[in-house]
């Protein structure tokens, strides 16, 4: 995309007329799927995402919003190179963080839905790449670098984004694994959860840590628990949310097809994986960059969880 072609593309995406916006989205999809296109420059990517963001802003009916959110997220999977998809994804997150505080209350739910769709599509993209380590590391960098939605040190990043990602992250990974047409290699949980491990360790706010533990760590470790089969576990009490995608679940696809950090070595039994992840939390808690308040909580989580395992084994 050249500097000359980017502005009109963005202008058409954000047009008042729905037919113009729809035509621009189709043109965008064809453009991104063209493997002969040059990589999009950072300035042009910013202009492009400005247009896409306000294209979604203009969508005003639930079914239209849901269809457009899915269409935009699926663009990640239509691009011909993994690096191009990740560059497009970086543009999404940069635009989302940049524009988030300007979203009014009435539009907030649909942007939560858009985030959910992109998280799901990203997991499918990474799964399709066989969880290539460099791709997973790039994704983690997108989330945790300065300006990323899970950056622990950037006070400009809205905390509501970190909360929402905590709420949906494991849930969407489970859905992505369940929906794969061709079975994915086991998902490397330690790698994929690294942004939450680091945010939990370094966040300056106790509420963010609490959200990560209650919505990521606790339900995940419950699902992976070796003390009882997943199908026999009581359903976790989940907050009621407005997003129509939300379902109560114990992550059956995740439990049956995950590993610690090496997909090619095959899946790991849930109880063993749980212990390895808890050990990883203990190791991060021990690092010098971990805040003292988080260190105490992470040590406590490790101790309580391993004591539960030991008690179950003795029983």
Image (tube, rainbow, N blue to C red):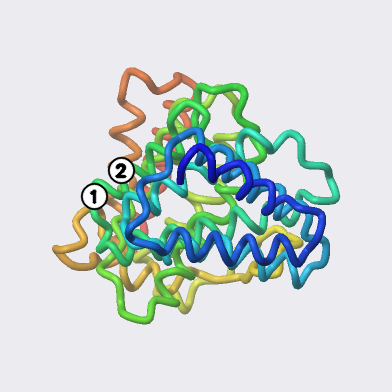
Q: Position of residue 168 (x, y in %)?
A: 57, 56
Residue 114 versus residue 301 in the image, above or below: below
Residue nearest the observer in this picture, 88 or 226: 88
Query: Is residue 69 found left or right of 133 in the rendered image?
Result: right
Query: Is residue 276 found left or right of 239 in the rendered image?
Result: left
Crowd around label 2: few <14 · some 14–19 · many ≥20 (10 Å): some
Residue nearest the observer in this picture, 238 or 263: 263
Query: Is residue 74 found left or right of 132 in the rendered image?
Result: right
The answer to whether the residue labelled 1 contacts the one labelled 2, judged by CB atoms less than 8 Å apart, is yes
Extreme residue in the bottom direction: 181
Quarter of the image holding residue 206? top right
Crowd around label 1: few <14 · some 14–19 · many ≥20 (10 Å): some
Question: Which residue, given by chain and number where applicable, does mark 1 sit on?
Answer: 133
Residue 285 versus residue 120 in the image, above or below: above
Residue located at (50% from left, 50% from top):
216
Q: Position of residue 277 (x, y in %)?
A: 32, 48
Q: On residue 51, which mark appears?
A: none
Quarter of the image holding residue 303? top left
Query: Is residue 300 found left or right of 133 in the rendered image?
Result: right
Q: On residue 137, which mark appears?
A: 2
Q: Position of residue 98 (x, y in %)?
A: 63, 33
Q: Real-space Cα distance between discs 1 and 2? A: 6 Å
Quadrant where the C terminus sits is: bottom left
* Secondary structure of residue under mark 2: helix
Residue located at (36% from left, 42% from top):
194
Residue located at (45% from left, 35% from top):
42
Residue 230 versus residue 32 in the image, above or below: below
* Secondary structure of residue under mark 1: helix
Residue located at (23% from left, 49% from top):
133
Extreme residue in the left direction: 265
Question: Is residue 55 shown to the viewer in this render?
Answer: yes
Residue nearest the observer in this picture, 31 or 230: 31
């Amino acid at each position: 995309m050249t500097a000359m072609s980017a502005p009109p593309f963005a202008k058409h995406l954000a047009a008042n007329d729905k037919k113009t916006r729809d035509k621009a989205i189709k043109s965008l999809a064809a453009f991104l799927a063209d493997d002969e296109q040059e990589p999009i420059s950072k300035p042009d990517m910013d202009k492009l995402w400005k247009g896409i963001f306000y294209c979604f802003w203009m969508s005003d009916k639930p079914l239209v919003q849901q269809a457009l959110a899915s269409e935009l997220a699926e663009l990640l999977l239509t691009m011909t190179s993994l690096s191009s998809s990740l560059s497009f994804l970086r543009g999404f997150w940069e635009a989302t963080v940049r524009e988030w505080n300007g979203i009014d209350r009435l539009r907030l739910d649909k942007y939560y839905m858009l985030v959910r769709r992109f998280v799901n599509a990203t997991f499918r993209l990474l799964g399709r790449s066989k969880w290539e380590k460099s791709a997973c590391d790039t994704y983690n960098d997108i989330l945790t670098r300065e300006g990323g939605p899970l950056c622990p040190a950037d006070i400009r990043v809205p905390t509501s984004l970190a909360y929402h990602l905590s709420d949906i992250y494991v849930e969407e990974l489970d859905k992505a694994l369940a929906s794969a047409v061709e079975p994915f290699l086991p998902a490397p949980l330690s790698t994929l959860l690294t942004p939450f491990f680091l945010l939990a360790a370094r966040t300056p706010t106790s509420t963010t840590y609490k959200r990560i533990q209650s919505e990521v760590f606790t339900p995940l470790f419950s699902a992976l628990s070796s003390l009882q089969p997943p199908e026999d576990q009581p359903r976790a009490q989940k907050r009621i949310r407005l997003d129509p995608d939300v379902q109560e679940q114990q992550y059956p696809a995740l439990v049956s097809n995950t590993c610690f950090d090496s997909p090619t070595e095959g899946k790991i039994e849930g109880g063993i994986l749980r212990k390895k992840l808890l050990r990883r939390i203990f190791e991060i808690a021990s690092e010098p960059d971990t805040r003292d308040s988080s260190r105490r909580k992470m040590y406590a989580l490790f101790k309580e969880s391993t004591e539960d395992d030991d008690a179950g084994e003795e029983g």
